[in-house]
Image: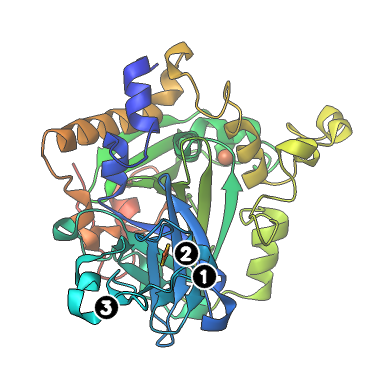
Amino acid sequence: MLSIEDNELLTRTGPGTAMGDLFRRFWLPVALSKEVGPTEKGPTKVTVLGEKLIAFRNKDNTVGLVDARCPHRLANLYWGRNEGDGLRCVYHGWKFDKEGNCLDQPAESEETCFKQHVKLKAYPTHEVAGAIWAYMGPADKKPPFPEFEFTLVPSDHVYASKRLQLCNWLQNLEGELDTAHVQQLHQHEVVPGSMVALAPRYEIKDTGFGMLMIAKREGKDGTPHAGKINWRMTPYIMPSGTLIPQTPERPQHLTFAVPIDDVTMMGYTVSWRADRPITGEDMRRFTEDDILHLRVDPETFLPVANIHNDYLIDRKSQATETMTGIPGLRLQDVAVQEDQDGPIAPRHLEKLGSTDLAIVMMRRKLLTTVKGLQNGQEPPQPSDSESFKCRSVFAEVSSDLSWQDVFKSVQPAGSKVALEA
Ligand code: FES
Ligand SMILES: [Fe+2]
């Protein structure tokens, strides 16, 4: 359980909140590339961490991310005209570039130099892996862009999607770290007789990017898994990213929860392969087998199967074939995460068990980091950009290998993840 005060601390991310300040120390995905521009398409509404923003693409292909409120009389810049080198407010014609400088004020006299004293709030962006990323924190604390492996591979090796999820961001993150639910909620996605059906034991280690959640399942004597250990290692990438455990021959997937406000979030999934482009067969698996990338409404990003249609639950299938009757891993997760006694779970009511260790440790780490930041202590993770180049682990190997051996054996060349002993 978590006290009411600590639950408030971790779940509120608007401007001026402590957790909001922590989110604002990291680069965050804020839109898909395909949503923004070209110039004549007009700007795009983006709401992140409770801030209403506008994204627009310049003629040189760079992307601006600015406050939706024109500083003059607060008209919405969504109606603005993208002139290729800046956005012009249609009310009185003030024009701003992507750094928020005021370039033009048609009705003001040049002599007053008024425009030099006007600034529109603007955030730096970086475009990679089919997404626009932004840094929304203090300019003097801006970290280097994290060296995720997918930023270092050709663009056709990466596929990104996003979905609107109707709950607080923390419910999604906790679900991603909760390995014990796999053999229940997703039991019909688990291969029958595989070691994932066994109860795991956990270890949790600090790393440069956050934490590594290690689930260990030992093969029983007299079964085909005797003498083997099944390792599922989930990197928790602060503040709200996880790498879903995957076998080495499958693509890697980053899932990232980005708060829109305190009761809705955008869930980004970035899938990539280091060795070859993403193929049609990969895409089929993403969207039909595992269903990690959901089918969504192209405007709102609300999944086609959602809370309003009971996630297309098939009760007959649930009674006779599957645990949930809900199709696909991701949707099963969304269904349970969107209502844990509401969109912000009252965590003081929980009864946590031994398999909730990963969640307890993640909360503890976040609370320490958030409270540290409140006292002026900067989090070390954002500046350790090289440590973000890592992969998850899902492997069944001989029991004489240590977890460090197994972890290191699947990491990309040049990986610099420092591991706690
Ligand atoms: S409100 Fe934008 S120019 Fe006047
Ligand atoms: Fe899940």
The residue positioned 68% from the left and 74% from the top of the image is 280
Which one is earlier in the sequence, the residue at label 3 or at label 1? 1
Question: Which quadrant is home to the N terminus?
Answer: top left
Using the image, determine if residue 300 lies above or below residue 331: below
Report, in whole angstroms, how far the alpha carbon at label 2 lies from the one at label 3: 23 Å
Q: Which residue is mark 2?
A: 77
> Disc 1 residue type?
Pro
Label 2 and label 1: CA atoms lie apart by 8 Å
Q: Is tag 2's residue or tag 3's residue first in the polypeptide sequence?
A: 2
Res 109 label: 3
Percent x, y of residue 318: 81, 31
296, 235: nearer the viewer: 296
- Residue 357 appears in which quarter of the rendering? top left
Query: Dividing the image into four equal quarters, which quarter contains ligand 1?
Result: bottom left
Question: Which secondary structure lies at badge 1?
Answer: loop
Mark 2–mark 1 CB contact (< 8 Å): yes
Q: Which residue is mark 1?
A: 43
